[in-house]
């Protein structure tokens, strides 16, 4: 039975309108992605500039720290030399003290000889000579003893003064060196604190750069995928069975309208004080909201599954599957061919932990659906 021409024309018009609407939606999404790409590129430039500034600051601090270390080492060498000099002075002082003891003994003997001779006056000398003594020898002896005492005492005073002066100089040198050492230690500690702060800042900047770079790469991949999708939608009514879903990763439509109440990944449950893993997304959608196929494929499963409720699994080819569960009703059957946007079921009444569950698996491994779906609005 052939359909009336009017019906065919209307159907074609509806399909064309749907395709045009899909192209417009994809175009808006593409512009959103491109705007975010520009924003991330600007952010990456700022991060690069800030990282360069931090790196220069780190180099400066490293140079200052090296200089402080060198000065500390220099100061340590000065202290070591001063201590060595002080040790030598102590040895010299001990030798000087022994010499002074010997000189004191010699002076004492001279004084005893002087006392035995009596006062060195002229009458004593004449008296000694009249008694048969040698006047010239007596005068010479007295003069020698007197000069020796004077010389010894002068040398003793000079040694004592030089000792005291040198000790004072060394005391000043050691005190100054110790003060400089303390100041340099403090400066070194300050530089190390700043160095640690700059290092932490560089690590944060590098992490931000990597994260921004990853997001930028993801958005560029989405941009390419959306561009391919728009080309397909603009050139034909629907995707063919030869299309590889992986080429459109990041451009697939969302399966249902609603708030994401649980994201992909590991989550802590305070109620049970434990962790759980979500292999997909949990939505809080309005009751009866349509749940759609995100890409063409063949229905591989369409019935109740324990723990998941009513569930539909679609085989998109190339070992990529999508799963929608928690449905109030199922509107497709096993082996049915579905297209992007085909209604596979309706959302059940809302629940605290979400009423629609969606998952994507590639080669048997759960994938983060956000990486496959179109960019969500912030």
Image (spheres, rainbow, N blue to C red):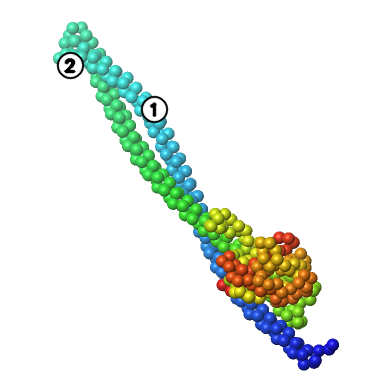
From the top left corner, tell me how far across and down residue 111 is, in percent: 23, 17
From the top left corner, tell me how far across and down residue 237 is, in percent: 76, 82
Mark 2 vs mark 1, CA separation in Å:
40 Å
* Mark 2 or 1: the one toward you: 1
Q: Mark 2 points at which residue?
A: 119
| Figure quadrant of residue 274 | bottom right
Work out whether 139 lies above or below 336: above
Furthest toward the top, the residue is: 132
| Figure quadrant of residue 370 | bottom right
| Figure quadrant of residue 321 | bottom right
Looking at the rendering, in which quadrant would you find the C terminus? Answer: bottom right
From the top left corner, tell me how far across and down residue 21 is, in percent: 67, 83
Furthest toward the left, the residue is: 123
Q: In this view of the protein, can residue 272 be seen by the observer?
A: yes
Q: Mark 1 points at which residue?
A: 91
Disc on the earlier residue, 2 or 1: 1
Please give the label number shown on residue 115: none
**Residue at 68%, 72% in the rendered image:** 329
**Residue at 45%, 49% in the rendered image:** 188
């Amino acid at each position: 039975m052939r359909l009336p021409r009017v019906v065919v024309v209307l159907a074609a018009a509806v399909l064309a309108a749907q395709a045009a609407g899909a192209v417009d939606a994809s175009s808006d999404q593409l512009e959103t992605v491109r705007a975010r790409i520009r924003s991330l590129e600007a952010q990456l430039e700022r991060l690069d500039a800030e990282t360069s500034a931090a790196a220069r600051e780190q180099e400066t601090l490293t140079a200052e720290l090296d200089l402080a270390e060198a000065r500390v080492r220099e100061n340590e060498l000065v202290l070591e030399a001063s201590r060595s000099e002080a040790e030598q002075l102590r040895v010299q002082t001990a030798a000087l003290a022994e010499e002074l003891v010997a000189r004191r003994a010699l002076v004492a003997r001279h004084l005893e000889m002087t006392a035995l001779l009596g006062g060195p006056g002229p009458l004593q000398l004449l008296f000694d000579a009249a008694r048969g003594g040698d006047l010239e020898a007596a005068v010479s002896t007295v003069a020698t003893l007197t000069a020796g005492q004077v010389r010894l005492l002068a040398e003793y005073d000079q040694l004592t003064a030089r000792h005291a002066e040198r000790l004072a100089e060394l005391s000043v040198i050691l005190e100054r060196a110790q003060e400089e050492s303390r100041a340099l230690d403090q400066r070194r500690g300050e530089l190390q604190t700043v160095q640690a702060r700059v290092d932490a800042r560089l690590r944060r900047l590098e992490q931000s750069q990597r994260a921004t770079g990853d997001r930028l790469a993801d958005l560029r991949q989405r941009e390419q995928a959306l561009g391919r999708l728009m080309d397909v939608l603009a050139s034909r009514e629907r995707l063919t069975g030869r299309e590889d879903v992986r080429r459109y990763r990041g451009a697939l439509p969302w399966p249902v309208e609603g708030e994401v109440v649980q994201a992909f990944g590991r989550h802590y449950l305070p109620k049970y004080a434990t962790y759980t893993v979500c292999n997909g997304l949990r939505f809080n959608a309005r009751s009866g909201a349509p749940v759609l196929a995100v890409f063409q494929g063949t229905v591989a499963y369409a019935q109740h599954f324990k723990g998941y409720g009513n569930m539909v699994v679609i085989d998109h080819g190339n070992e990529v599957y999508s799963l929608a569960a928690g449905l109030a009703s199922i509107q497709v059957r096993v082996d049915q061919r579905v297209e992007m946007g085909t209604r596979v079921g309706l959302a059940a009444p809302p629940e605290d932990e979400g009423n629609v569950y969606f998952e994507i698996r590639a080669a048997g491994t759960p994938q983060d659906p956000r990486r496959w779906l179109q960019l969500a609005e912030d």
